[in-house]
């Protein structure tokens, strides 16, 4: 989670052997004008010899070493200075020892595929760790969970490029607003927690209320909650207008339609006045025409074709998160990511299906932005979004108002896959 503190940076560059930790760590320390340390230098002689013989270290072997790494960080902390140390830190339990329960330690995870790192090790010489130990490292590797707030950086670039990405991540971390986070035990509890917050938030608002809803399976239980006691009786249905963050280019009767899923789950026919429901016009001749028509409706509703920062379009924007880092229908590599003028735009999903999506400017024009994330399969990508990985569309969103994360435990801090 980003933090506004200006305390000295205490950074642990982590990853398996061969990820480039030492090269990147030294270069990062130069950029930050701070001391550098390599945790390899803190191994006991017996541990070094064991690894030279091709034997992986046990957890028992590593505990004194991890304590020395933590002590090095404490030395920098006591002196009030920044520092960069490289350490494999492959397990969550190892990182907990190094972190020592403090929030001022930032882990930078150099992420790479096993095959790519094996190629690097094949040409490396003079290191105490033999190539055959790489398999054992990947076997025990536990990539950082979302609640560890690590910065994930791929190793595919040159060292200078990797350091530039780390510096960008650190800047984002210091500048960005920390999202309010609510964690529930399971998807049903998550739906109820979001419904509690949603109703309480809307009850305090006067006048017209505007909500952008998300498609997909995760929010369906939330919509169903809103149509049941006690939530249904508390919502000011006659004042809420419902728009869609994205839609598939299919008829509204299609099982794939976000509109159909939402309308059925929330029992729109019972509770929502017809004039308050604003589906994407998928009866258009093409997704591009549907996007243009929806943009026109949005602008007519707002009363202008220019967004006023002091008057956000939405009161609440609900967003999901795909396993590829997409949100709404803003997919990695999509031209829609670069559209900064139109409010709605055609998009194509990885499976080739046509979509219509709201663009960043409109999605960002919201008083409250909520990411709803559930399931263990979302945990790695959520960690990357929270580390501000700019390769991911969801991480590039910069809402004007408050950002909130509602996640179940499996997505936020569940056990490693």
Image: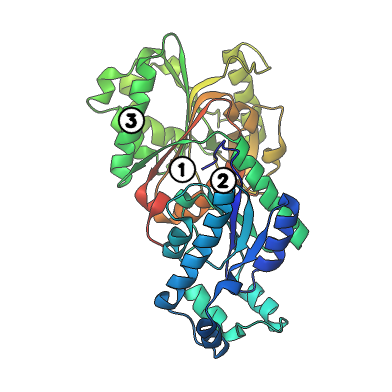
Q: Which of 121 and 67 lies nearest the eye of the viewer?
A: 67
Residue 86 appears in the rendering = yes
Question: How far is mark 1 from mark 2, CA to CA?
Answer: 18 Å
Position in image of residue 294 (x %, y %): 60, 25
Label number found at residue 326: 2
**Farthest-out residue, top:** 207
Q: Which residue is mark 1?
A: 256
Which residue is at the front of the view, 283 or 106? 106
Residue named by callout 3: 195
State the residue at coordinates (61%, 61%): 85
Q: Secondary structure at mark 2?
A: loop
Residue 176 in the image, given as x and y percentages of width and height = 59, 36
Pointer 1: residues within 10 angstroms few (<14), some, or many (20+)?
some
For the residues labelled 3 and 1, say whether their Cβ atoms are less than 8 Å apart.
no
Q: Looking at this rendering, what residue extends furthest in the bottom direction? A: 53
Is residue 175 found left or right of 402 in the rendered image?
right
């Amino acid at each position: 989670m980003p933090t506004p503190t200006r305390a000295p940076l205490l950074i642990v560059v982590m990853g398996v052997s061969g990820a480039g930790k030492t090269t990147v760590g030294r270069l990062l320390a130069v950029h930050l004008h701070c001391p550098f340390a390599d945790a390899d230098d803190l191994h006991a002689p017996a541990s070094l010899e064991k690894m030279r013989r091709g034997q992986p270290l046990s957890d028992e072997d590593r505990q004194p070493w991890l304590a020395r790494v933590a002590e090095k960080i404490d030395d920098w902390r006591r002196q009030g200075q920044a520092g960069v140390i490289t350490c494999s830190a492959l397990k969550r339990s190892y990182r907990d020892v190094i972190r020592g329960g403090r929030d001022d330690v930032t882990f930078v995870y150099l992420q790479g595929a096993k095959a790519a790192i094996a190629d690097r090790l094949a040409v490396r010489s003079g290191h105490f760790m033999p190539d055959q130990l790489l398999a054992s490292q990947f076997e025990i590797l536990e990539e950082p969970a979302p609640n560890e707030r690590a910065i994930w950086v791929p190793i595919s670039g040159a060292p200078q490029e990797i350091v530039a990405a780390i510096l960008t991540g650190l800047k984002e971390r210091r500048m960005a607003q920390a999202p309010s986070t609510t964690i529930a035990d399971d998807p049903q509890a998550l739906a109820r927690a979001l419904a509690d917050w949603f109703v309480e938030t809307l009850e305090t608002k006067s006048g017209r209320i505007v909500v952008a809803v998300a498609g997909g399976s995760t929010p369906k239980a939330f919509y169903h909650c809103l149509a049941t006691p006690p939530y249904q009786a508390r919502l000011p249905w006659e004042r809420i207008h419902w728009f869609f963050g994205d839609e598939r280019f299919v008829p509204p009767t299609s099982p794939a339609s976000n509109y159909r899923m939402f309308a059925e789950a929330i029992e729109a026919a019972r509770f929502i006045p017809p004039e308050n429901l604003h589906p994407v016009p998928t009866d258009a001749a093409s997704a591009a025409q549907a996007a243009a028509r929806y943009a026109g409706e949005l602008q007519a509703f707002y009363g202008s074709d220019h967004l006023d920062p002091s008057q956000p379009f939405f009161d609440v924007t609900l967003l999901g998160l795909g396993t590829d880092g997409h949100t709404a229908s803003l997919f990695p590599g999509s031209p829609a990511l670069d559209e900064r003028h139109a409010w709605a735009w055609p998009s194509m999903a990885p499976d080739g299906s046509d979509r219509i999506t709201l663009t960043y400017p409109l999605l960002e024009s919201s008083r409250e932005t909520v990411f709803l994330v559930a399931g263990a399969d979302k945990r790695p990508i959520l960690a990357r979004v929270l580390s501000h990985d700019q390769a991911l569309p969801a991480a590039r969103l910069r809402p004007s108002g408050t950002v909130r994360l509602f996640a179940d435990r499996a997505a936020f801090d569940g056990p490693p896959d």
